[in-house]
């Protein structure tokens, strides 16, 4: 069983957000939050911003392109419609972040305002208004404008992003998966990106499915390879049940509710089947005695990412003794009397 620990560690390093992104993301978040908080209308609605999303949960992968400002409006009246909330957010943000050199920085979306930060290498912030809501099960959560119809007075969508942050922290702690949950989710997100690119569903869907996968008890170690392969299989099974069998994906943050997943039925089925196919290949690699062939499989599944200087390359490096095509390198034998000797690996005994 090729553990390939060095290679998995290198892959995680290669998909980790850059230092610049880690520095710029909180700056952009603060700028948008402060702009909204300074407005008297929004402040009167009890505006309390919080950072949410994959960056907050530490499961984002390179590059970080967006940061989410979850604008909790704790005192907003029930009769204020989604379009009014979005309109006030838009008014404030367009004033604070005006058009520069013909480039519009604020874009209104179905349920949020997107603010571009060109000075931060294309980073943007999504600011979404949210109002308090109590679910039918008595859970105190939030509602945000529904993506499909933001002008509908009943166009609200329930959400509980803070709970997903809590779940991530719990599963990653010493009493559960002892620091292996977060890196494994990163590898799953990178696999989705490698297999499907920009197609929907996105990384959040994989992350929600991974929560259920880890909770089955069938995602196990001890190595990164073991966690990755078993997580691929179990996450693929959750996605298959949800999208191919048509059971829907349970929202782990809101018991009794199904997650709202973007994408067509065909795209959702494609994600599930891609993960199960990847899991089968990964399991064969894990069970193989051929280290080079196994490394090639993992390299193909995890694909490429942009490095620190903007170049794109595979994130999973091949072992030094392996060729890029998954075959072992051939080393010349030494014959008595040879004037030159091939370099060794500095291992003795």
Image (tube, helix red, strand yellow):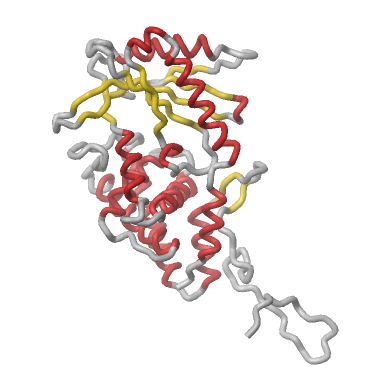
Depth check, front residue: 278 or 38: 38
In the rendered image, the residue lying farthest to the right is 339
- Number of numbered markers: 0
Q: Residue at x 67, y 75 (%)?
A: 345
Horizontal and vertical percent for residue 250? Answer: 24, 42
Give left or right: position of 140 versus 35: left
Above/below status of 170 relative to 277: above
Q: Residue at x 32, y 18 (%)?
A: 73
Q: Residue at x 31, y 48 (%)?
A: 211
Depth check, front residue: 266 or 175: 175
Horizontal and vertical percent for residue 78? Answer: 22, 14
In the rendered image, the residue lying farthest to the front is 174
Q: Quadrant of the C terminus?
A: bottom right
Q: Quadrant of the N terminus?
A: bottom left
Horizontal and vertical percent for residue 170? Answer: 32, 48
Give left or right: position of 278 versus 330: left
Above/below status of 164 relative to 24: below
Give left or right: position of 64 versus 173: right
Horizontal and vertical percent for residue 119? Answer: 62, 25
Q: Residue at x 58, y 29 (%)?
A: 122
In the rendered image, the residue lying farthest to the bottom is 336
Q: Quadrant of residue 243?
A: top left
Above/below status of 321 relative to 32: below
Q: Quadrant of residue 112?
A: top left
Above/below status of 188 relative to 349: above
């Amino acid at each position: 069983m090729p553990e390939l620990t060095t290679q998995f560690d290198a892959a995680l390093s290669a998909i980790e957000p850059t230092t610049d992104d880690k520095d710029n993301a909180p700056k952009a978040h603060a700028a948008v939050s402060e702009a909204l908080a300074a407005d008297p209308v929004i402040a009167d609605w009890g505006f309390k911003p919080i950072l949410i999303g994959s960056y907050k949960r530490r499961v984002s992968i390179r590059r970080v392109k967006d940061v989410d400002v979850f604008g909790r409006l704790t005192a907003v009246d029930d009769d204020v419609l989604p379009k009014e909330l979005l309109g006030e957010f838009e008014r404030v943000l367009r004033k604070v972040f005006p058009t520069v050199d013909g480039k519009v920085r604020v874009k209104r979306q179905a349920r949020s305002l997107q603010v571009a930060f060109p000075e931060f290498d294309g980073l943007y912030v999504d600011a979404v208004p949210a109002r308090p809501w109590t679910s039918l099960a008595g859970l105190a959560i939030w509602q945000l404008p529904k993506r499909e119809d933001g002008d509908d007075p009943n166009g609200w969508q329930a959400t509980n992003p803070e709970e997903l942050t809590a779940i991530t922290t719990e599963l990653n702690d010493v009493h559960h998966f002892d620091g292996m949950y977060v890196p494994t989710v990163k590898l799953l997100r990178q696999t989705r990106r490698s297999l499907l690119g920009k197609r929907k569903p996105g990384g959040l869907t994989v992350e929600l499915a991974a929560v259920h996968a880890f909770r089955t008890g069938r995602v196990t170690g001890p190595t990164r390879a073991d966690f990755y392969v078993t997580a691929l299989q179990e996450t693929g099974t959750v996605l298959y049940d949800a999208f191919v069998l048509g059971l829907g994906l349970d929202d782990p943050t809101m018991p009794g509710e199904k997650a709202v997943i973007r994408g067509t039925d065909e795209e959702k089925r494609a994600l599930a089947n891609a993960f199960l196919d990847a899991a089968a290949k990964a399991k064969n690699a894990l069970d193989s005695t051929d280290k080079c062939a196994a490394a090639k499989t993992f390299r193909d599944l995890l694909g490429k990412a942009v490095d620190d200087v903007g170049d794109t390359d595979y994130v999973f490096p091949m072992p030094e003794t392996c060729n890029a095509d998954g075959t072992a390198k051939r080393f010349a034998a030494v014959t008595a009397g040879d004037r030159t000797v091939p370099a060794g690996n500095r291992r003795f005994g």
